[in-house]
Amino acid sequence: MIEQSQIERWLREDVGHHDVTNEVPGETDGRLVAKESGVVAGLDAAEAVFDYLGVDVDECVEAGQRIEAGDAVLRVDGPTADVLRGERVAVNIAGHASGIATKTRRAVDAAREVSDSVDIAGTRKTTPGLRGVEKRALVAGGGDTHRLDLSHMVMVKDNHVAEMGMEAAVARFRERASFATKIEVEVERPERAVDAAEAGADIVLLDNMTPAEVERAVATLPEETLAEASGGITVEDIPDYAATGVDVISMGSLTHSAPTLDYSFRTGAE
C-alpha cells in the first residue's frame, strides 16, 4: 500500500509550487508504454499517483507479467493537466521498479538452470523512502524480500562478533528476541560456518566466499540450518553458487544497481 503522504512528497518534488508547464485545459487519455522487454512492477504506485490526482485508471497490467516493447501497461483518462502532472512520477517509479523485477527474474532464471529450490533474495540495500516499492518489485520478479527491516530478523555481523564474540552475541540476541525471530550469523571463512550453527544460528550467511568455499561450508552444516551466500554475486555467477547446495543467494545489486526499464508516456490517439 502506498501512503498518501508519500505520493504527496513525490508530486511536490516534481510539480513544485507554480506549475505552468502542465496548465493545459480539457480532458485526455494516456498510456504508459514499454520501450523494451522486461517484467512489470511498480504499477500499483503509478496507479496511486493518478488516483491521488483524480485521474481514472482504466487498465493496469498485473505485476510480474512479462512484457515486450510496444506494450501498453497502464491506461488512464482525466483532466489533461492532472494526467500530465502525474506522468513523470508514474514513469520514474514504474521504470525503477520494473528494472528491479526484470533483473530479479533474470537472476531467478539463472538459478533454475541448476536448482529448483535455491531462493534469490534482496537485501536492505534499498533507496531511502522506496523500500516498499523495491521489495514488491523483487517479489514481482520471483525473488524473496529477505528481511524488510531490522525487526524481522537478527543478523549477527562481523562487528557484533568483534565486540562480543560469536557465542555471546548469539546468546544475547536470542534472549532478547521473540521466539518467532530467526537469528542469522555472518561468517567469512568456510570453517566458521559450523561454529555459527553450534552457537545457535538458524541461518549462516557465507559472506564473500567463492563457490568452492561455499560448497565446503554447506557440507559442514546440520540439515536444519539454512545457508545463505552473499557478497558481490552477479547474475552471471548464480549458476555456480546455486550448484553448491546453498539455500539462499542474496544480492544487493538487485535493488541498488538494477537498470531502469525504459517506459514512455503518451497521450491522445494511438
Image (cartoon, helix red, strand yellow):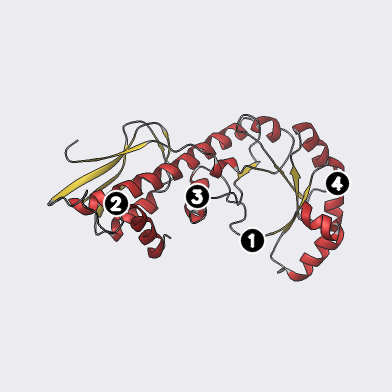
Relative to residue 130, is residue 111 drawn left or right?
A: right
Relative to residue 54, is residue 231 drawn left or right?
A: right
Tags 3 and 1 in contact by the CB under 8 Å rule? no
Label 1 vs 2, first from the N-terminus: 2
Determine which quarter of the picture holds residue 251: top right
Label 3 vs 1, first from the N-terminus: 3
Label 2 vs 4, first from the N-terminus: 2
User: Residue drawn at (24%, 54%), measured in percent from left and top?
Assistant: 19
Circle 2 SS class: helix
Relative to the observer, which residue lies in front, 120 or 16? 16
In percent of width and height, residue 56 lies at: 24, 55
Residue under label 3, please give it. Answer: 134
Label 3 vs 4, first from the N-terminus: 3
In percent of width and height, residue 193 lies at: 83, 46
Residue under label 1, please give it. Answer: 150
Q: Amino acid at mark 4?
A: Arg
Relative to the observer, which residue lies in front, 10 or 66? 10
Q: Residue furthest front?
A: 18
Label 4 vs 1, first from the N-terminus: 1
C-alpha separation, residue under disc 2 versus residue under disc 3:
20 Å
C-alpha separation, residue under disc 3 versus residue under disc 4:
33 Å
Tags 3 and 4 in contact by the CB under 8 Å rule? no
Residue under label 2, please give it. Answer: 86
Relative to residue 101, is residue 202 drawn left or right?
A: right
C-alpha separation, residue under disc 4 versus residue under disc 1:
24 Å
Circle 3 SS class: helix
Circle 4 SS class: helix
Few, some or many C-alpha atoms within 10 Å of disc 1 (few <14, some 14-19, many ≥20)?
A: few
Can residue 210 be seen at all in this image of the molecule? yes
Residue under label 4, please give it. Answer: 192
